[in-house]
């Protein structure tokens, strides 16, 4: 019987079929990976993996501050890589953060699609790690997308914790100086800086008056938290984010039953806490992460 099969060449045809299937699967994997890379490049996201693509290790989304350099955000990724977590990190654009919230929403949803792809129906645990208002705004739109029933992304990923570094603050007239300094830091030419300074002084007030999205940003985030534990890292001397704003946000979430952890340094700088207090900062982040993983 075996000899008859060999003479007909059926094993050869079978092997060739298997090879063809394997080749098709390999090409599909390459295409899927290329598509994933394109999605990341589109929004400037960098992914670090500590395991294979099929790994179920937790994922930390590092939502960077305005004009953050990747070499700085990478230091925060390293905290979690050492714990065996995967990370994805993106910087924020100050123009989008303060003047183009619709664009921030688009980027947030594109990031969420990447997170869903990383999840791959494995129910992986996710932590959102937001820096300044650039990161906070992205957190806000992701929260909206996965928390509202009927939305396409409703409950698409499992958020087990949120970390807020140097945020939030309540946008308004008092924010103008901070916005101007943040955006001007990205402009090297003194003459252009002067023009932009004046331009922002003219553009920002109408945005505050007429942008319903901006007006609802903080109230909506305060009223509808994820419900997962939260860690706030901030200071009393932040020139851009008054600590009283952070405390109001914290107390509101506590009243809604959210488990909140805080660390407020008396003297530090905006998104400078890790650099100024590395041991304390790492202790806070690691303890919080471990706590979330046990829940």
Image (cartoon, helix red, strand yellow):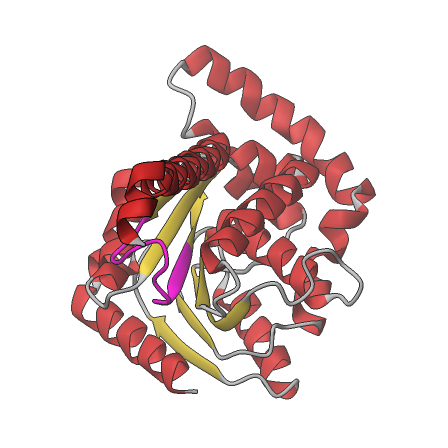
Quarter holding the N terminus is: bottom left
The overriding secondary structure of the stretch rendered in magenta is loop
In the rendered image, residue 119, in percent from the top left (x then y), is placed at: 48, 60
63 left or right of 137? left
Q: Is residue 186 above or below residue 111?
A: above
In the rendered image, residue 67, in percent from the top left (x then y), is placed at: 41, 36
Q: Is residue 66 shown to the viewer in this render?
A: no
Task: Please report the bounds of the magenta region as a residue range.
Answer: 48-61
**Residue drawn 42% across the image and 21% down it:** 187
Magenta highlight on residue 52: yes
203 left or right of 40? right
242 left or right of 69? right
135 left or right of 56? right
Q: Is residue 273 above or below residue 107?
A: below
Q: Is residue 277 shown to the viewer in this render?
A: yes
Count numbered badges in the picture.
0
Quarter holding the C terminus is: bottom left
Magenta highlight on residue 280: no
Along the line of sight, the residue nearer the viewer: 40 or 206:
40
**Residue drawn 57% across the image and 66% down it:** 245
**Residue drawn 77% across the image and 35% down it:** 206
Q: Is residue 208 above or below residue 20?
A: below
Q: Quadrant of residue 80?
A: bottom left
């Amino acid at each position: 019987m075996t000899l008859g099969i060999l003479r007909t060449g059926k094993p050869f045809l079978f092997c060739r079929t298997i090879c063809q299937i394997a080749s098709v699967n390999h090409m599909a994997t390459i295409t899927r990976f290329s598509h994933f890379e394109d999605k990341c490049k589109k929004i400037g996201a960098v992914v670090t993996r500590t395991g294979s693509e099929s790994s179920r290790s937790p994922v930390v989304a590092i939502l960077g501050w305005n004009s953050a350099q990747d070499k700085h955000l990478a230091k925060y990724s390293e905290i979690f890589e050492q714990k065996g977590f995967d990370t994805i990190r993106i910087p924020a654009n100050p123009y989008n953060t303060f003047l183009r919230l619709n664009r921030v929403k688009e980027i947030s949803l594109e990031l969420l699609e990447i997170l869903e792809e990383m999840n791959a129906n494995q129910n992986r645990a996710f932590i959102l790690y937001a820096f300044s208002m650039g990161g906070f705004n992205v957190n806000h739109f992701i929260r909206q997308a996965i928390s509202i029933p009927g939305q396409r992304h409703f409950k698409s990923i499992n958020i087990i914790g949120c970390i807020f570094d140097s945020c939030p603050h309540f946008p308004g007239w008092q924010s103008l100086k901070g916005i101007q300094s943040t955006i001007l830091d990205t402009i090297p030419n003194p003459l252009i800086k002067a023009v932009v300074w004046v331009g922002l002084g003219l553009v920002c007030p109408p945005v505050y008056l007429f942008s319903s999205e901006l007006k609802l940003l903080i109230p909506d985030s305060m009223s509808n938290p994820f419900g997962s534990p939260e860690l706030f890292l901030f200071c009393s001397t932040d020139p851009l984010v008054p600590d009283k704003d952070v405390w109001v946000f914290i107390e509101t979430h506590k009243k809604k039953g959210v488990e909140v952890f805080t660390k407020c340094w008396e003297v530090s700088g905006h998104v400078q806490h890790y650099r100024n207090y590395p041991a304390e900062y790492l202790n806070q982040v690691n303890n919080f992460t471990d706590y979330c993983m046990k829940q």
